Amino acid sequence: MSDKIPPQEAENLWAPYVPDDKMPWDLRRVVHLHRRAGFAATWSEIQRDLKDRPKPSIDRLLGGKARGPSVPPDFERVAALLADAAVSAGDPARLKAWWVYRMLFGPDPLGERLTLMWHNHFATSNAKVDDLAAMRRQNDLFRALGRNPFDELLTAVVRDPALLLWLDAPANRKEHPNENLGRELMELFTIGIGHYSEDDVKNAARALTGWTVEDGEFRDVPARHDGGDKAILGRKGTWKGEDLLKILLENPATAQRLAVRLGEQFFGEGVLDKTALDSLAELLRRNNLRVGRAVETILRSRAFFAEKNLATRVTSPAEYVIGAVRALEMLEPPPSTVALADWITLLGQDLFYPPNVFGWPGGRRWINTRSVVGRANCVAALVGGSSAGRPEPLNAMGNAVRYQRGGDLEDVIRFYSELLVGTAPSAAFRERLHKALGTKTALDSETARRVVVLILASPEAQLG
Amino acid sequence: MLSRRDFLGRSALVALAPTVPAFLARSLRAAAPQRDGRVLVVVQLSGGNDGINTVVPFKDEGYIKNRKALRLPEKQVLKINDQTALHPALGDAMKLLESKRLTIVQGVGYPNPNRSHDRSMAIWQTARFDPEEHNGNGWLGRALDSVADSLRESDRTRGASAPPSSLFVGTQALPTALRGRRSAASVLSRLEEFHLMGEAAAVRAMTSSPAESSGLSDFVNRSFLDAYTTCDRLAEVARVQDAGVSYPGSGLGNRLQLIARLLKTGFAARVYYTSQGGYDTHAAQLFTHANLLRELGGAIRAFLDDLAAARLADRVAVLVFSEFGRQVRENGSAGTDHGTAAPVLLAGPGVQSGLVGTAPNLLDLVGNAPKMTMDFRRVYASVLEDWLGVPSKDALGGTFERLPLFRG
């Protein structure tokens, strides 16, 4: 469905974006940047970035400084306490709430988005691991190494206790190899389907024998390792686990798969074609699979700010819910993070419990009957306050007035449309909104709240 | 009321409508293969159901000798033949049997039975004996993997929308039985999840008229319209109750009623799973067990009658199992302790009604419990291959001889 991009233009796609008449640095692109690479932005952050132009705005996101003064000064300490308490209480709901707290208040929304990406890539579920300390440790690992060269991340994740338990490494022994880890390492974590044979899977499993978890820690048990000859992707040797990782990392298909992952994260449906993905993979290979470098290239690129990349991606439940709370500045007091995690679960993204090894399919699959109803009920609950664990309803009128946008109803509608969707409302959109508002349209705090619910729950607001 | 053909069409529509342009959906509706329309509803009896007092071998000397306070009087049991009867509280199940809608597979278990609730439930849910595999995928999840593949790949490339392969109705965590490598299960606890609440009700007006393009914004808009239609239909089927069908006002009754409503609305999952707890009857079992069985039989009969009135019952089979039966000789507190093999029930108009297999001899016990006469994987293989039409070998870790559980 995408237009073909000639090869000479593919390279050009990754060239830095410089605003011009066709691609101006406007409200839409600032809102796009924050919704696609973070969890939306407040009106003052949007105005700051509009004034500052692209480079400082993107620098701030890359450097974990986009949120400025709204980050609590003792954020890391509080976050650590929340995680410790969740782990010692053995309560998954509180561990989910901890991650929500990080997404909502942390200084580095891009880092949290990448953590979500790796959680999906190495999709590990506590349903099987049943160990919150291990799940938290894996999550922190994604956060710490998420921008590093991929070999560092992969090497650490394949020794991560939660992942090893998830993929049955303890059952993978010389006498009876278990293929689970070897298969997913090839199919999902590195080269992808079509680039290996079933014999490769068997031999990869043999290479990994001996890697296990004991007392919650990674252990390499030589007595369980199969030291025999193995042929993997056409290379013969007495391969061990680390040799296997090296073979997979050197295979060009790994960069290709990472390019697809980054594409899902930062681009809308059908925006990148094969040529564009090939050239992103080539860029990754040239840079030693340095993920942070690729992310920087993407966020600064013409491709990222191209017209066809705007509002062409279905927001995930976490992006949608956290983004709404951020944009509406419901931070003092915030909604209950446990309630937010519950909503995110209801909308289909049960954090720490991905549906299977493939993670969440995402894209159009985020939208179904239950989630359509759920998204509307969720924003109504957030705006109403009490059923989202917030002591007061959203002061929607007050916020508009604070930004000098509360003159009349049209002004309020336009303000919230710009804040939440990134554009002024079209005539058709306004017409639908007025139909939904009905006859009771006196400009008061109740009406302003209804405007917010209707905009956030509209089909348009699901795309970001 | 929906005709069966309408239903088949609608279920395909609900499965495909969000991505397939309407004209294409219409031709798919005409071609919907019947077998894909078949549905399995699993009812898990948690705690270990006393199979001996469910399907009662009232003439068995071992029964007469071992059961004292808990022996069901021959005058009261509901006789199937001159040896075997149903518990007096299973009048509704007897009606199902009389109308050829109930199969009873006798003596179902597995070799070297384990009497721990968790371990034995894990064996039933995964069809695997190695504890290392008990946290992995389940027998139904694995079986549904084989049909989830095509959806998955189309999704990867084009973002197609597919229904969940299975749905767990309840408030507990997703059962291992439904976990798969590719197939996706979802959990539904309340019908309210399909209601637009309060302020949210007004959002209906925010959709535009439907367009048939496959573009993303048209897809989203169409999905919104679809969702509201589905909610309306759910509300409608909830309002229009068929005369003469009354579900027991109990947890299981409510959950089966919810599943019936979803089926009437065209919900497209292949497997539905729910449970009824309370079967761990170590003390004063008589009264508790009778109530549980009355609720079970009443709920399943109401469910099948409800679906029959909606002309959907032909597509539905209900499988009832428990992690183990109970011991033959009762304990000192008028209860029974954890046992082994027990009957498995299959209900629906598509079953080959009657008794299947041989009842264990209650004079020939191991550790005060019956010896199994039927491997549970033979039941599973028949359900997968003959009812759902999906391969059973990988799901069950081997090939098992099937049983004549279903009609042609």
Image: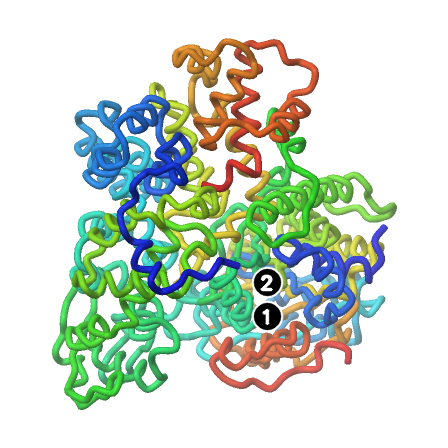
- Give percent across and percent down for residue B268: 65, 58
Tell me which amino acid carries mark 2: Asp
Chain of the residue that carries numbered disc 1 in the rendered image: B
Is there a contact, CB below 8 Å, between mark 1 and mark 2? yes
Q: How packed is label 2: few (under 14 Cα within 10 Å), some, or many (20 or more)?
A: many
Residue B237 drawn above or below residue A65? below
Where on the picture, by quarter, is residue A240?
bottom left
Pointer 2 residue: B50
Among all residues in the image, which is located at the extreme front? A21
Quadrant holding the C terminus of chain B? bottom right
Relative depth, front residue between A104 and A416: A416
> Which residue does the numbered mark 1 point to in the structure image?
B342
Residue B163 shows up from this direction: yes
- Residue flagged by tag 1: what amino acid is it? Ala
Find numbered disc 1 in the image and state the secondary structure of the residue it sits on.
strand
Residue A124 image point, x, y percent: 34, 58
> Which structural element holds mark 2?
loop
Upstream in the sequence, badge 1 or badge 2? 2
Q: CA distance from mark 1 to mark 2?
A: 7 Å
Along the line of sight, which residue is nearer the eye, A4 or A259? A4
